[in-house]
Image: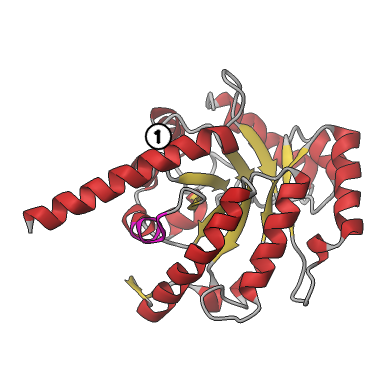
Amino acid sequence: MLIQTRRSFLQHSAAALAGAAFLPQLLSAAPGAKLRIGARNFGSNFEPAKRAGMDGLEIGVGGAAEKLSIAEPATRQKLKDGMKATGLSVCSLSLDLLNGHPLFNDPQAPAWVEQSIAAAQDLGAVAMLVPFFGQAHLLQGKEWKKEALDALVARLKELAPKAQAAKVCLGIECSLSAKQYLELLDRVGSEAVQAYYDIGNSTNAGFDVPADLRALKGRLGMIHFKDGSSYLGAGKVKMEPVAAALQAINYQGWIVLETSNPSQNAEADCQRNAEFIRKLGL
């Protein structure tokens, strides 16, 4: 039992060190720079995002089709034009369609991920959101769906080298504890596959968010900030401990707003949330 525990520790440590080597050059801001803030609230509209103080946008890849919208040259050119006009980035691509077409069992899903990897590389996006909610959730209650997990690991092992070659991080988002994230990531064993952690979802699931963030040091690809229908700092999520945890692990990646718009004005509300984040010293 002692040998097994030590082996698990060494495997986890090696994976974390590999991730630490890969993530800074791929995901981090320039040395000394503040964390960059992106948003999902503006679709592909760069101008209002710029006015709201965003540094980038998380862009959806489109609905289910043999060829995704994001794979179309015209779609990407429009995004490039918006980036050039505003100086903002496409920080990440979001494959929301995978919630209804799970990566672990849908025959089309791997091809969609590959199309999105190519698009992310073309757009200079450093990460992709690969979600597992609804019928794609990886847990039944608090336990793994074992067949789904095994199938997902196999598919991620095939996709990860392609993502790494393109210098794109595959960010897995599901309502998982840090322990569960690490189990999944260690099984995949690739520095190109990381956790996409959502502080709002994790708070609602009853997880200790600051402790999770500390445990995921070197394994965090991206982070979603949200707090239900509230502005950041005005709801259930305790933001000061979250900020302290991110500072403690020297997180230098993107924070992506998936916040609500209490005033019905996305520009004003995202600006307020971004200003709150920056006042936390992140």
Nearer to me, 159 or 267: 159
Q: Name the residue at 79% across, 72% down.
A: 67
- Tag 1, which secondary structure? helix
Q: In this view, does 162 lie above or below 66?
A: above
Q: Is residue 113 visible?
A: yes
Q: Which residue lies furthest to the top in this view?
A: 32
Nearer to me, 19 or 200: 19
Residue 95 figure quarter: bottom right
Q: Name the residue at 73% across, 36% down.
A: 54
Q: Position of residue 63 (x, y in %)?
A: 76, 72
Q: In this view, does 18 lie above or below 33?
A: below
Q: Residue furthest left?
A: 2
Residue 117 among those drawn in magenta: no
Residue at numbered disc 1: 245
Residue 188 among those drawn in magenta: yes
Q: How would you classify the magenta stretch by its main secondary structure?
A: helix
Relative to 206, 162 lies left or right: right
Question: Please, which colouring scheme is shown?
Answer: secondary structure
Q: Position of residue 84 (x, y in %)?
A: 88, 36
Q: Is residue 57 above or below residue 141?
A: above
Residues drawn in magenta: 183-189
Q: Where is residue 197 in the image (x, y as percent from the top left)?
A: 49, 51
Relative to 201, 53 lies left or right: right
The kind of residue on which mark 1 rests is: Ala
Nearer to me, 120 or 250: 120
